[in-house]
Structure formats: structure tokens, C-alpha cells
Image: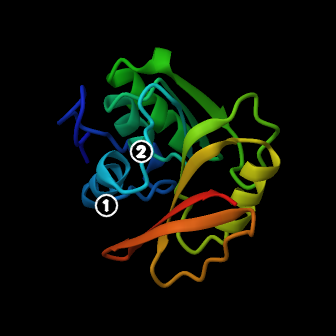
């Protein structure tokens, strides 16, 4: 895995041995497609100089890609200590630790947010039935800005229900990965 574009283009995103069982990285192809939609898509959403949230962060690939492409700051959340340590390792390796916060938490039971985020990546383990509770938690805790965008990744064979507090504005499929773009309803 590598950073696709921006100031860290080509830099490797490591998956440390301790995190191998806790992480399922998104393919570079799907990640590139997501950022192309964000950068050039019809939705007109920019994360440049904005706060980004990477929930179920794993390696930190989504958040690090956002930092590479101009996000102001990224908060990485994962309930796995090993996954969060992996994201921290990658951020430190890219000298982005001053632009990153790390939070050990269950993405389905988040506390009240200290601030809202313009862009949220939600990439839970496939078939974990975590998407709906995580979206409810993000909404209840005030984690998403009123005009913010939430990117949700899930397996194509996974049955997903989105709470009525969110509206799906786009859906794309990349191999077995389905990407949904959501806004607050």
C-alpha cells in the first residue's frame, strides 16, 4: 500500500505484524477512486484545510491520504490498540504526528465530540454489523459538520441499513468493496 497523491505520494503505508489480525486495508485502487470522487466529483466537497475523521482506522491509510492531499488535521479512531499503534507508526514515519490525534474507542459507541468533522471515513470490519450503530453514534455525538460528508465502505454481499439521519448521495463498487457517500439528512 502506498500514498497515491499529494506531498507523500509514493510513500509506503506499513501493516505491522502486530496489527495483521486487526486490519483489512482498503485497496489502493478503491482509495484512489474515493479521493478522485472527492477531488473531482459532482458533489463539490473539499477537505482541504479541514478536519478529517478516520473511524476504524486500521493502518491509517484514509487519514494519511487526506493529510497528504491537504487536510488540516486527522483524528484516527480504532478500538484495537494494535491497529491504532499501526496508524500512529505510519503517521510518525510520514512526520504527520503533529497533525494527527489518536483515540482508542469503539466506533459504535463514541463519546460526545469536542469538534465536528468535514469529512469522515467509516471503514469497519466487513460483516461486523457496525455501520448502522457507528453512524448513529457519529450523529448523536455531533461528530459530523452539518455540510460534512461521510464515506462508508462495506462488502458488496453485506446487507447495510443506513439510519434516516443520513442520506446516501452516491454509491460506487470497486471489486467486492462498496463505497457509499452520505450527508446528514
Task: Report the colour scheme.
Answer: rainbow
Find residue 27 and report its horizontal and vertical position in percent.
30, 59
Outermost left residue: 10
Among the two numbered marks 1 and 2 on one chain, the one whose residue lies closer to the N terminus: 1
Is the Cβ of the residue at disc 1 closer than 8 Å to that at disc 2?
Answer: no
Give the camera-side residue of 20 and 49: 49
Outermost top residue: 98
Q: Image quadrant of residue 60?
A: top left
Is residue 70 placed above or below 154 in the rendered structure?
above
Please give the name of the residue rendered at 39% of the width and 43% of the height, measured from the top-left corner.
Answer: 61
Give the camera-side residue of 91 and 120: 120
Find residue 20 and report its horizontal and vertical position in percent.
43, 52
Q: Residues within 10 Å of mark 1 (few under 14, many from 20)?
A: some
Q: Is residue 140 left or right of residue 176?
A: right
Find residue 34 and report its horizontal and vertical position in percent.
35, 55
The disc label shown at residue 62, or none? 2
The disc label shown at residue 30, or none? 1
Screen quadrant of the C terminus: bottom right
The kind of secondary structure element at disc 1 is helix
Is residue 136 in sight in this rendering?
yes
Find residue 39 and report its horizontal and vertical position in percent.
32, 45
Amino acid at each position: 500500500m502506498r500514498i497515491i497523491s499529494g506531498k507523500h505520494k509514493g510513500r509506503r503505508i506499513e501493516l505491522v505484524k502486530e496489527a495483521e489480525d486487526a486490519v483489512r486495508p482498503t485497496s489502493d485502487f478503491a482509495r484512489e477512486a474515493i479521493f478522485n470522487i472527492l477531488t473531482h466529483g459532482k458533489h463539490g466537497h473539499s477537505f482541504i484545510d479541514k478536519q478529517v475523521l478516520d473511524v476504524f482506522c486500521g493502518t491509517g491509510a484514509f487519514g494519511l491520504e487526506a493529510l497528504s492531499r491537504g487536510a488540516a488535521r486527522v483524528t484516527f479512531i480504532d478500538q484495537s490498540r494494535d491497529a491504532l499503534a499501526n496508524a500512529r507508526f505510519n503517521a510518525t514515519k510520514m512526520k504527520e504526528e503533529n497533525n494527527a490525534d489518536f483515540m482508542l474507542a469503539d466506533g459504535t459507541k463514541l463519546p460526545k465530540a469536542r469538534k465536528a468533522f468535514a469529512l469522515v471515513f467509516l471503514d469497519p470490519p466487513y460483516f461486523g454489523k457496525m455501520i448502522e450503530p457507528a453512524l448513529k453514534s457519529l450523529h448523536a455525538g455531533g461528530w459530523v459538520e452539518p455540510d460534512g460528508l461521510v464515506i462508508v465502505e462495506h462488502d458488496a454481499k453485506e446487507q447495510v441499513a443506513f439510519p434516516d439521519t443520513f442520506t446516501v448521495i452516491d454509491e460506487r463498487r470497486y471489486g467486492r468493496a462498496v463505497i457509499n457517500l452520505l450527508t446528514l439528512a
